Image (spheres, rainbow, N blue to C red):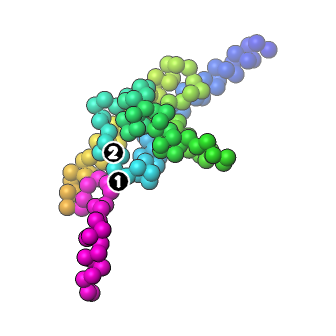
Amino acid sequence: MQTLWTRFRQWRLDRLARQITPEAARERVRRGANYLDEVDPGWDARLDPETLELSDGTCCVLGQLHGDFRLGLGRSALFDLSSAPRASLSPVRLGFLCRQDVPEALQARDYAYLNRAWRAELSQRRREASDAPSAGASKSARPPERTPAASRQAAAVPA
């Protein structure tokens, strides 16, 4: 029975290790970036790819945006203490955290892939923003705010 259990555990670890790939990390990061576009427009301009390190709670994506990974979970509405939390908002699934159900060596590999994927995402967004200056800043940049005076003037101008 012990051998069967040992073989099962090894099969499970091998299976999980095959799921930790650069492609999987890029997909998770794409989901996380799209989520941040919805809840925090302009987030990408506030990140420093040089100091980005997902295994560090203050240098990770949410840490750079909100000061600390755990604060970022709440401020980004990923962690919700309401009576009906949204189970689909997993920091692992969105590329903010490594897989937790694997040994430390696989977690380190997952973090390395995620770090590369976030840096690539930021680089691509910045490249796109600099290639299209007339079209505006990054695709997640906020539109210019209108002052109350400008709104009143626009409303007063006849069509």
| Residue beneath disc 1 | 140
Q: What's under tag 1, amino acid-wise?
A: Ser
- Residue at horizontal 25%, vertical 76%? 153
| Residue beneath disc 2 | 44
Point out the image quarter for the N terminus: top right
Residue 37 horizontal/vertical position (percent): 41, 51
Q: Is residue 120 above or below residue 104?
A: below
In the rendered structure, which segment of residues is drawn in magenta? 135-159
Q: Are marks 2 and 1 in contact (CB under 8 Å)?
A: yes
Closer to the camera, 27 or 46? 46
Question: Tag count in the figure?
Answer: 2
Q: Is residue 100 above or below residue 105?
A: below
Q: What's under tag 2, amino acid-wise?
A: Asp
Point out the image quarter for the C terminus: bottom left
Please say whether residue 93 is visible from this viewpoint.
no
- Residue at horizontal 41%, vertical 49%? 40
